[in-house]
Image (spheres, rainbow, N blue to C red):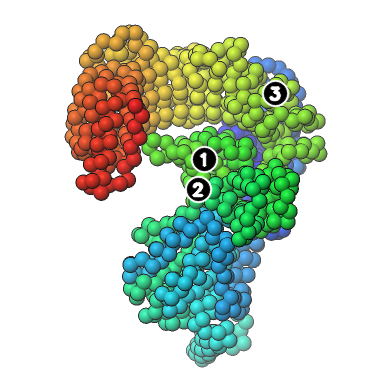
Amino acid sequence: MASYAALASAMELLEDILHRNHYPAILHRRRQILKSLHQKFTDLRKSLKDYSSKGDEAADLVERRIRDTAYQVQDVIESEIANPKDSEEGNHVFKKIIQNLVLACEAEDDDDLQKVGREVDSIVQELKAIKESQELENLRLGSVAAEVNAPGQTPRADADAMVGFDEYLEAIKEKICGNSAKLQVIPIVGMGGIGKTTLARNAFDNASILERFDFRGWVTISQDYDVIRVLQNIIISLRIMTMEELGRLVKKALDEYEKSKKELEKEKIKSGKAKEGRKKTQQELREEMEERRRLEERTSKTCIYQHLKGRRYLVVIDDVWKKKVWDDLKQAFPDDGNKSRILLTTRLTYVAQYAVGTSKFLYEMEFLKADASWDLLKNKVFGQGRCPNELEDTGRSIAGKCKGLPLAIVVIAGILSSDTTLGYWKMIERNVSSVLRSDDDQLSNILSLSYNHLPSRLKACFLLMGSFPEDYEISIPKLIRLWIAEGFLNSDSDSGNLEERGMEYFKELVERSLVIVNKKKANGEFKFCVIHDLLRDFCTTQGANDHFFNGKDWNESEKVRRIILYSAAPRMPWALKDTKYVNSICLFSRTASSDLLRLKWHSVPLLKIVDVADIKTLVAPTAFSRMFRLKYLALQLGIEKKKHLPSSISKFLNLQTLIIHAPVCESISLPSEIWKMPQLRHLIIDRMNLPAVPEVDDIPLQKLECLQTLETAENFVFTNEAISMIPNIRKLKLICRGGEAGDIWNQYCLNNLVDLLRLEKLNIVFHAEQFSYVDSFQSSFAFPRKLEKLSLQGCRLPWENLTVVGSLPFLQVLRLRNGAMSGNVWAPEENQFVKLNFLVMESLDLKEWIAEHEHFPNLQHLHINKCTELERIPAGIGETLKFISVQFSKRAGESANEIRKEQNDEYANFDLQVHVLD
């Protein structure tokens, strides 16, 4: 939703100006109008909270007005920022920009901004009117008869469409016919077009299921459903009564209601509490309409409940979008302990979880595998006929490009059916995505439903995922950092919780079956994700239509704000006449790196995001020194570039994320000015020489309270002053060099790390010159209490000192690599490692590991690599293990197989997987 993105960006710009510490007094005269605009935008955002449009013309018009209004205020302000009248370099640049902004606001632009304010007021009122209109429409619809499927017109199963779904159908049938006597809700969850309804239809019409139930009914729920219509649809579908009979029943209830209302009105007139002939107020009319609706709803529920009481029934509730649907319907279904079932389909995991309650059973549909995809395509094209041999390879390729989505396969099969020549199929093979986009409204409509149902705050976040290349594994932390830089999360969150809010947003997209998590971290956190090609295509098309980011063609008449490039183009976008409004540049193609040299960076002064980390570029950070709005900068430096950052880095007044990769393993030196960048949230450099915290008199300092990620700092001394500068750090990666490992710990003051009270992830690598046995770690040796993940390498820590680690109450992941520990025996103490879930031991000289289940009560994943001296894995820890991986550790591998056999034979535990590589 470009409107939300534009609104977030405008609010972010106003906040930057209003909350700048060195905000000059000269701007005070204009401060009031800027504050007023910010408040109006805040009110507008509140009106949009959790608002999801129907995707109709009226909604599109409102969203365009919001987008255009938000961009207008940015254009008024940024036009002067983009063209400062004074080109003076150095510390006075920002002051001059602000002065120019004042000049821009003093005359005609002031009128422009006031016009924007009036437009925002108008939009807020229009949104309010739309919501009220929708509420009244829902009330009105409830008072008219429903248009429902006539008896016997429940959607029929398509047996052909079940090709590739045999296992799914058997699993659903088994659940429907299960032994549980209680009423069970059986949800089928998956993205649009994956076959939920098809699966439900085939189960509904299956002969073995049909004969088990006295009543069977089917109801489809629309996004803007009306509960009365749904209940009436259920009544008709269950064949409880005809539409005419239902109408008479409802009319009788309403007549009785009207009669009682008239008698009550007479009593009020008689007692003097009301006047005869008095007109009812709008509020009274609304309350009366709502009461009539409640009566209709209650009558319909009672009808269903009474007729199903004591009978075994199966009801399919198809395409559910809200938890409220289940709240509205569940009272209509009696639970008589007779094995009645309700089959529910939804795209939303949280809706399914809500409906099943404590049973927690979910049937999540997956994409079809390659063979099943080909079988479905072949069956839809040729039916029972034979596919010509010369078409099979091409057909399999086409099916594979549908990425396992059944609806896409069925659509493309319909296109292939018209011409079964090899040449035609080859042409389709080359253009599967574009053919699917242009040739089928049903597919487009199904995908649009999921998008339109998103609340406004999620639409922009989802659309941004379309900016990544096809089949690109999207780093979830990176995605959230980009959302933050764009301002999508700023408006609703305080600065300390933006990453958590971003993860909440991401999980919502997963629960809505719009995103696929394909890799998780060791502690179960989401790490990488992908989206189906068709959803990505939808995002790119929608994003281009909304001017959210560029499409494939560049239109000089449009203001380009986000430039996304996947490959070198014959005519690069910076050849456009006007690039001053560009906010983001993201390059994913190595072939485009040389074209980057053609960009004149002074022509894009308003950049917030520069992401060229995927290409080796000759651009150095100095190129961006005047872009004070820059929030996200990711680079991969060229070999010949100097390995230090200039002091001008401090001019990045708003920089939140700085990522630098170097092609060779050399440290990049940072200037002292890095300590005067309070907006910095993530500092990620392959290896960095971080300077000591300067003296207070030397450079103006304030705590880097936003900084959450610092990696990888080399040979940095964590003095008390340094610790106090990064109080909210959550992820820290260090490399420390020195003589003895025990001395290194003291040399870099690592005992002070215990004072990083929010630290959750810590990675320490020692490069010690001497590798003698170490037993002299100081008594102050400790780690922060909140640690969840700890990785140690080269520390030569005695095994007995690992009790300090074992006592950490939240530790879930522990990696011990390359001499992290020293000694031959590890005998952990009881009541430690209480939450440890994931353990890695690599290149250790451990021989004997003595442990039982009590020492690792929650351990599920164990990875052992190059521990050649380890005699065996303790059998006692196998009770909770789900996965053991052993590489190049022969005797440990043998004991791993013994543990698996014991778990299988003695405990019937067949979930444990063991992978051994000698």
Mark 2 nearby-residue class (10 Å; few <14, some 14–19, many ≥20):
many
- Along the polypeptide, which appears first: circle 1 or circle 2? 2
The part of the image, by quadrant, that contains residue 831 is top left
Q: Residue at x 48, y 69 (%)?
A: 206
User: How many angstroms separate mark 3 from mark 2 (CA)?
Assistant: 35 Å
Q: Amino acid at mark 2?
A: Val
Q: Is residue 716 visible?
A: no
- The residue indicated by pointer 3 is 596
Q: Is residue 323 above or below residue 147?
A: above
- The residue indicated by pointer 1 is 529
Q: Is residue 869 left or right of residue 333?
A: left
User: How many angstroms separate mark 1 from mark 2 (CA)?
Assistant: 9 Å
Q: Residue at x 48, y 66 (%)?
A: 203
**What x and y, as percent, mark residue 356?**
40, 61
Q: Which structural element holds mark 1?
A: strand
Q: Nearer the viewer, residue 647 or 104?
A: 647
Q: Nearer the viewer, residue 441 or 304?
A: 441
Disc 1 or disc 2, which is closer to the eye? 1
- The residue indicated by pointer 2 is 510
Q: In the rendered structure, are the residues bearing label 1 and label 3 in contact, judged by CB atoms less than 8 Å apart?
A: no
**What x and y, as percent, mark residue 680?**
52, 27
Q: Amino acid at mark 1?
A: Cys
Q: Is residue 86 left or right of residue 686?
A: right
The part of the image, by quadrant, that contains residue 284 is bottom right
